[in-house]
Image (spheres, coloured by chain):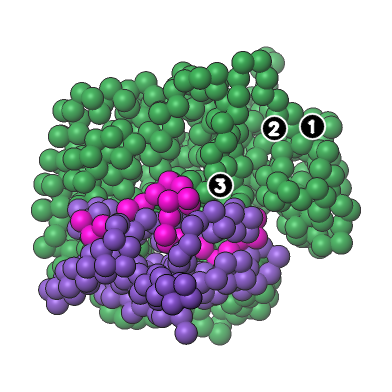
Amino acid sequence: MTPIVRDLGAQPLSGAAHGEIDAAAARLKRRSQKVLRRSLHIRTVDTGSCGACESEIRLLSSPYYDFHRLGLFFTPTPRHADCLLVTGPGCRAMDHALLSAYEAMPAPKVVVAVGACPLGGVFGADRYTRGEITDVVPVDVVVPGCPPSPLALIHGLLLALDRIEERITLQEGEQ
Amino acid sequence: MNEGESELTLAQLARNGASSQPMVSDLRMSAAGAGDLVAKLAPIARFADMFVRPAEQGLERVLVFADDQSGGYLRLICPLDESFPVPLSQVLPAAYQEECELYELWGVEPGGGKPVNRVILPPSAETAEPLRLPGGDRLSSEVRAPHVVQGEAIEFPWGPIRGAGQESLYLGLVTTGEELLDAYLAMFHKHRGLEHRMVGQTLARALFLAERCEGLGAVGNALAFARAAEAALGIAVEPAAEVTRCLALELERIYHHIGSLAALGAATGLSVGQAEAEILLEDCLRLNARVFGHRYIFNLLEVGGVRRGADLAALDSALDRLEARFESLVADLLATNSYVDRLEGAGTIAADDAHRLGLVGPVARAAGVATDLRRTHQVSSTSYVGFQPAREQAGDCLARTLVGAAEVRESLRLVRHWVRSGTPLQDDWAAPGPGQDHVRGPAEGLGWAETCRGEALVHLEVAGGRVSFARLRPAATRNWRAFDDALRARNVFTDVPIVEASFWLTVAGFAR
């Protein structure tokens, strides 16, 4: 079953929520070092978002969240990416670009669907959009919200690391 | 002008037209008559929109012109079965984008054999049906404007997937090396068919879609939609709800312009300035969440009013500190020569071009064009008392930054005035909504709002409480039109992100 992240960003951040950010951040860093033995690299693809998810993604590297301190980085090429962050309802004109980006990523790789759009929560399937991006690429983690806050995105990346760890374990078992 | 011929004025034309709602006049005429009139209107009116809609007999074309002197809109309506003797964009260059869109949506050719660009349909589609006329004559892929890159120049392709957190679009940068010679944009990879989706929906559901036309402009687009619906249904909005809407609109403008500063910091490589702006941006988003329950102020507006009141105490307590930190940020940025040097002279748009292309919002105001609906097209006489629009003349990235800073100051002044002067504001969870009395026969309305990026227009037709036709024209639709012009103005490759950050438009708004 695809893990679903609870969106804490819908409400103003309380002191407890700040504590939760720090705890999640520390956990994320430990997992990244354990699982990958290096930082996690993220490629983003917009398949028709309204732009709000992109704004929250940009803020991941802002001083409040500073995800670089956790060993998380954006990468300009899918060749270096472990994780594909996908926003938008899967506009059909983006099918080719999205699939190309996914196929260009090395294994093990995960796809994180960001926001209500890629889950089919805003637009249905018709001649313009897919409705759900699972028709184009397999989705490992969904982060709902319209848009999900940067904190919810960090939670989603934590779950993505779990998935990568599962795949590495699976690969090692097969060998 | 011939001797004895009286000077044509918009006010005079508006008086001759039929009035479908306050501040809107309609003139019905033949295509030939409209073609003549458009040539006379071009220098004195701002071209705002053109669309095609179903009428009782076939289709008809609607051209919308804005009067930025005395306020109001003039609509020229003509039957579609008559074509213009010359392409409209020959006298009205701003209309070329609409000409291209109308061809793909309705199969309407511009006239005069003028080639059109492929804009909405996916580039890979060889032929296709018009999107809004299923079963219509198939469109030919041969009909497209020449796009030739030759000599020592190459077209450097960038997109549709771009950098982290950037919206998808294709940008073809034509260069011989460092200097940018030309740029081609393909913007409709993200086309979601919002107008098509609205047809048959309830007003509440359609407003939900209008809000998501541009997430970073949700209030402005939803406000234009709500006003169009209210004009169609004859709903009067309570003054307290109207001021609350304006309050949300100004909070949106504040975070939007600060977001532009953060993007400019990133584009110029000024990490400290970027970080300072991002801290302020995050604080603004958290303030929005405290005041209106959502970081981007979604789900606040409703046809007939607002869904909830503002948390005025939270807003009041944050204003002074926000303003002080904003002023400190702007002062530091403008005192940094390496930053200012990158903005000065980059991405310049001349005032004539701004008018010719029908630009709106901060991009137009930075080029010396006086257009601001908050001054000229006020819906309520009490909301924007003493409002002063910002204006610069240079038209470059620095001018746009200065206009943005001045607008944040003015927005903060307005917010402070509304919060502290005892202006009645919505203070409850009242949800007026259109009652059954308002669900009636066919009606239409034009709605507008000065969003953070400029004028947004919505033309709406309703019947039986549901949308029968919708046309969205966010500010991004007009202003992206000037982006390639700005890039051609003696820029180099690394100026592209700076020009984009200073425009700070959304692709979503353009692609709808």
Query: Which residues are the magenta region?
Result: A69-94
Nearer mark to the viewer, of 2 and 3? 3
Would you name the residue on which mark 2 appears?
Answer: B89
Report if the CB atoms under discs 2 and 1 are less than 8 Å apart.
Answer: yes
Marks 1/3: CA–CA distance: 28 Å
Nearest to the observer: residue B361 or residue B179: B179
Q: Are marks 2 and 3 on the same chain?
A: yes
Nearer mark to the viewer, of 2 and 1? 1
Q: Compare marks 1 and 3 and give the one earlier in the sequence.
A: 1
x and y percentages locating residue B153 in the rendered image: 60, 20
Q: The purple chain is which one?
A: A
SS label for mark 3: loop
Marks 2/3: CA–CA distance: 28 Å
Q: Quadrant of residue B347?
A: top left
Q: Residue B114 carries which label?
A: 1
Question: Residue under mark 2: which chain is it in?
Answer: B
Callout 2: 10 Å neighbours few (<14), some, many (20+)? Answer: some
**Residue at 25% over, 28% down:** B339
Q: Compare marks 2 and 3 and give the one earlier in the sequence.
A: 2
Q: Does the magenta stretch include residue A74?
A: yes
Q: Compare marks 2 and 1 and give the one earlier in the sequence.
A: 2
Q: In this view, does A45 lie above or below B177?
A: below
User: Amino acid type of disc 1?
Assistant: Lys
B106 with respect to B358 (left or right): right
Q: Colour of chain B?
A: green
Question: Residue under mark 1: which chain is it in?
Answer: B
Would you name the residue on which mark 3 appears?
Answer: B160
